[in-house]
Amino acid sequence: MPVKVSVVIPVYNPGPYVEDCIASLLRQSLPPDEYEVIFVDDGSTDATPARLDGLAADRPDLVQVVHQENSGWSGKPRNVGIAAAKGEFVMFVDNDDYLGDEALERMYDYGVANGADVVVGKMAGKGRGVPVELFRHNHPHATVENAPLIDSLTPHKMIRRDFLDRIGLRFPEGRRRLEDHVFIAEAYLRAENVSVLSDYVCYYHVKRDDASNAGFQRFDPAGYFKNLREALDVVDRYTEPGPVRDRLHRRWLRVEIVERMRGRRLLAMPAEYRKELFDEMRGVVVERFGPGVAAGLQPTQQVVAALIAADRYADVEAFAEWEAAVVPKAAPESLTWHDGALRIAFTAEYRSGRTPLLLPAAGVRAPLEGPPQDVSEAVAWVGVDTVARFGEARVDLLLRERSSAAQYFQPVEFTREKVAEGESVRLVLRATATVDPATAAGDAPLAGGVWDAYVRVRLGGWTKECRLGPVSRGPGPTPYAGVVGGRVLLPYWTEPHANLSLDVDRATKRLGLGDLPPEGVSVSGGRLRATLPLYVAGDTDVLLRLDAGAAATGAVDVPGTVSAAGSGARLEAALPADGMKGATWRVAISPSVAEPRFLPLPFTLRTGVGGVRVVRKQPPSVLRRLRREFGRAVRKAAARIRDRKA
């Protein structure tokens, strides 16, 4: 078979972090005779060269290793990999990252179907940032004008080999920064088509535990911004002056300059280093960015850009201190099941410190003409502009899988509300998100695991995320688990922060069944009946597992049904006529599926002369209270004994 994809991995001293990369490459769903893996060892001094040579000896049909003297950076090893590649497409992977199991197959098929020269696969960031808006939905025919492609300039793309050769595109070599920006920017601007695949996580971008990834190391400001100018040169070479060029330049002004000079990110840097950065940045801002570039930034970003251009470092620091206190807050209001989906109602707004962010109720919106007189004027201008543009504000809910960091947007309906506070207003977004377990992962079912709920708020000059929670007042919504489509989904509040998470098919102790009333379980006529705080969309087949532990030989599984009953569900199952004698039986429930997942119920069945009776377990909250009360009683008794002896 012709090789469809050549995977090129530059390697330099990754240590154990290369193992996840290797494992993901060996797990690919693409048949092994349709792709190849090319490791280019850039003079590693650890045990990696021997590890890779052993892998190539074991899998000569799939893996080849090229060894070379250290070149200082990733550009040359990637170019060496391109030269060795036989595939129709070349996929670039870093040695401390890894791929989704179906990444190569999905990206290749999507690229061929859409005639793409460049395929951008959805990314998940494990400890590091990745683009979010770019992957809101699929873009089969994306350009720098109709999609935020420019937000993704890392090299982790699949690129058609004859496109690379036709335009002579290769990575800049040598020890330098932003070589991937130069390469990817030109690829975007010269490709006949770029396709963005967003319904499957293809690439996992990993921050090492020791933060030793090249991108996390402090850089030399002079060299860095020299390399940044080279990326801008690429844009200038392939675009005409005007709105498109300004929009592309804006990406570097926003991400590489302004965002480094904002809020907590700036304040976390050593004072001398951030001043050195500021001085180098100012030269780029003055030399390379015309007035149309900064004018398209968000209000807070415009303020920072203007202060940088005016060489007002002290005001940049003061503005950062004000911005550092501005954070989003999202409070859940209700959790309900409806038509097989979980509906989550919540509010979101920005806060300043511990109080809601108050903005001017009245004011005249005007463009920012030059830098503000001082920080107070800057804050006032941002406030007026934010209120005036409240109609553009939006809120999203994302589910992020805790172990992999894969995340997906959920459908959200929201309204905008101005809440008067004297002469000021609060800007509040009221939203309802719908989580359908069958489609919540990019039109696919949610995989088993823990999914954390994040709220993304875009308002004025800020786009920030926060966890959903805790509830703002009272005991808050109490979620039920749901059995939907053969999956068990449990919404729950994390400890100790009380944020919302969803447990899919993994819950063992937190099904919320501790609320089961004593009268809710009965055995009569050989049948077990129970009213459970569960949601089911209709009659659902289940399995009950009866387990007497060491008192019996193995567990007994019996079929049952769960049906909707008021706000909960009604369980009914026939107990086995024989085999339940003289023992206490633990009870667990599972959807009736090919691979059952049994979840314990808070009662046991005890058999004896009078038949089968129900023994209800105390919920953990009651047990904790009883332990506390017992402990207090013991301490009081001990104190009385000490007093008598005294």
Image: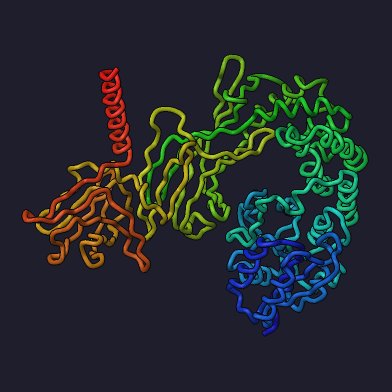
Question: Is 419 situated left or right of 471 in this image?
Answer: right
Report the coloring of the rendering: rainbow
Q: How far across and how far down the image is residue 368, in percent? A: 80, 28
Q: Residue at x 27, y 48 (%)?
A: 602
Q: How far across and how far down the image is residue 121, in percent? A: 66, 61
Query: In the displayed structure, would residue 354 be above or below residue 598?
Result: above
Residue, far bottom? 1
Q: Quadrant of residue 168?
A: bottom right
Q: How far across and how far down the image is residue 93, in percent? A: 71, 64
Residue, far front? 645
Q: Quadrant of residue 189?
A: bottom right
Question: Is 574 situated left or right of 97 in this image?
Answer: left
Q: Residue at x 29, y 57 (%)?
A: 589
Give the total number of marks visible in the rendering.
Answer: 0
Query: In the displayed structure, would residue 494 be above or below residue 70?
Result: above
Q: Residue at x 86, y 68 (%)?
A: 69
* Screen quadrant of the C terminus: top left
Q: Can the viewer see residue 232 in this picture?
A: yes
Q: Residue at x 83, y 46 (%)?
A: 219
* Screen quadrant of the N terminus: bottom right
504 or 339: nearer the viewer: 504
Query: In the displayed structure, would residue 437 be above or below residue 352?
Result: below
